[in-house]
Image (tube, rainbow, N blue to C red):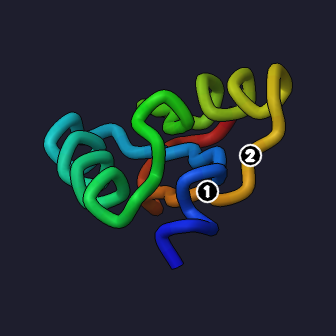
Amino acid sequence: MANLLEKARVLLVSPHVSHRSGLRKTLTDLGVNNRMIEVASDFATAKDCLSKEPVNIIISDDEIGKG
């Protein structure tokens, strides 16, 4: 599984810094390359990230607001 994750691009979306940093650590522990993880604190930033480069996995909080 780590082999699949090391090439995955991931977008983490949460207004909570502690959630984003904890999830980033978990993902890197699972084999995701830290440079392949994008983070966003709200919907608008997440939408901007997605417009620049596609991702394979999105992990999102349910309180990101509307964009």
Which one is in front, 36 or 65?
36
User: Residue beneath label 2, please?
Assistant: 55
Amino acid at pointer 1: Ile
Q: Badge 1, how many Cα within 10 Å: few under 14, some, many 20+?
A: some
Which one is in front, 27 or 6?
6
Q: Is residue 61 left or right of residue 18?
A: right
Classify 2 as above or below 20. below
Instruction: List x then y, in percent, for residue 2.
Output: 48, 69
Amino acid at pointer 2: Val
How many tags in the picture?
A: 2
Furthest-bottom residue in view? 1
* Residue contact between numbered discs 2 and 1, judged by CB atoms under 8 Å: yes
Residue drawn at (50%, 57%) of the image: 60
Which one is in front, 44 or 31?
31
Q: Is residue 43 left or right of residue 22?
A: right
Q: Is disc 2 placed on a helix, strand or loop? A: loop
Residue 40 in sight here: no
User: Residue beneath label 1, please?
Assistant: 58
**What number is the disc on residue 22?**
none
Which one is in front, 14 or 31?
31
